[in-house]
Image: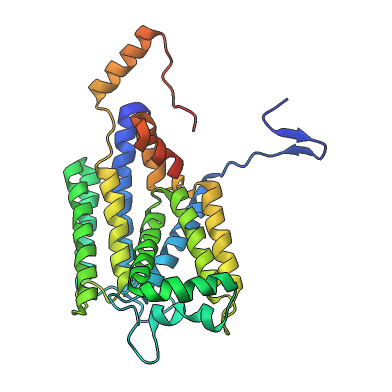
Amino acid sequence: MTGVAGMAARVRRAAIGLGLGAAASTLFAIPERAPWRLVAFGGGGVIVTLVLAALAIGGGVLARRALVVAAGLGFAAAAVVQLVQLVLGAGAVLGQDGSTMALFLAFAVGLAAVGTAQYPTSEAAAADASADRRSGGAAGPAPT
Amino acid sequence: MSTDVVGRAGPVESLEPSGLGRVLLAVVRITVGLLWINNVGWKVPPRFGAGTNPPQGLFEWVQKPLHYPVFAPYSWLVEHLVLPAFPLFAWGVFVVEACLGAFLLVGLATRFWAVVGLAQTVVITLSVLNTPGEWYWAYFLMFAAHLALLATAAGRAYGVDGVLRPVWRRRGGLVGRALLKAS
């Protein structure tokens, strides 16, 4: 599978992978102490993470970018709420320290990057290929 | 001549990770990401341990180079530059380490964040290498892990970089080129 269809499929798989990763990260809530309690989840944090992970997976499966972006924005909001809780010394609803905030930030940037990736539609790719043929050029990736 | 490099010592095999190699690279990247995420946990805003007697948390650890100097100019910097502006410095550490964990975990702009991780490892090493009870190999291993992420561009193995590099290449422009370099 190549071209636009391949790119769309890769982006969808990335959203699903990030969602599965987010869901799996809630396993860190099970251990009670170091070294395995790498992320200090609160009960609310587990629920929020599982809901947003389901949203990301749904967005990937259904090829709905809006759902993927919404999941990313949800994680960003959760990171902000966790930071505000830390600064105010408020209760540990989502998590108990900054590790939860950093984890939310990870899935926020990952899902936002994947959900907002600008790749050409099938029509635009066909137009590009047509232009390449007319100019006699061979479109290929630039070396980096 | 084949694509292998041939010298006096004979051919040198090119380094192309197998399927398993890519999985293992992703494991290393995710582990390093979790290292930073986990260590954001004991840095508690907004005071980061300042204002307590004895000092706690980040404020306690920032003072280690004064008690157990590793490199005299660095200790001078901590005393005259970092401690007087501790809140600003502490927020900087908090944000940088949270971003290190976040971006390395998902593999976004991995080479850039590997360089940031190396820089942060230098700072940590200069702060605590001579502190009693510290296992100095921990800091050497942190260097090695970040060098490995940088050398292998590890975000391309099951990371967001691997998915989005073709998009950035097609996009071109300053941002596209910067993201390609960073990934």
Splitting the image into 4 quarters, where does residue A45 fall? bottom left
* A77 in relation to A85, above or below: above
Q: Residue at x 27, y 77 (%)?
A: A96
Closer to the camera, A58 or B32?
A: B32
Splitting the image into 4 quarters, where does residue B145 fall? bottom right
Q: Residue at x 19, y 71 (%)?
A: A44
Image coordinates of residue A82 in percent, x first then y, are: 22, 69
Instruction: Judge left or right: residue A125 versus residue B154.
Output: left
Closer to the camera, A57 or B125?
A: B125
Residue A10 visible in the displayed image = yes
Instruction: Judge left or right: residue A57 versus residue B20.
Output: left
* A8 in relation to B73, above or below: above
Q: Residue at x 23, y 44 (%)?
A: A61
Q: Residue furthest front?
A: B80
* B108 in relation to B85, above or below: above
Screen quadrant of the N terminus of chain A: top left
Q: Residue at x 25, y 44 (%)?
A: A115
Numbered label tally: 0
Image coordinates of residue B125 in percent, x first then y, are: 55, 70
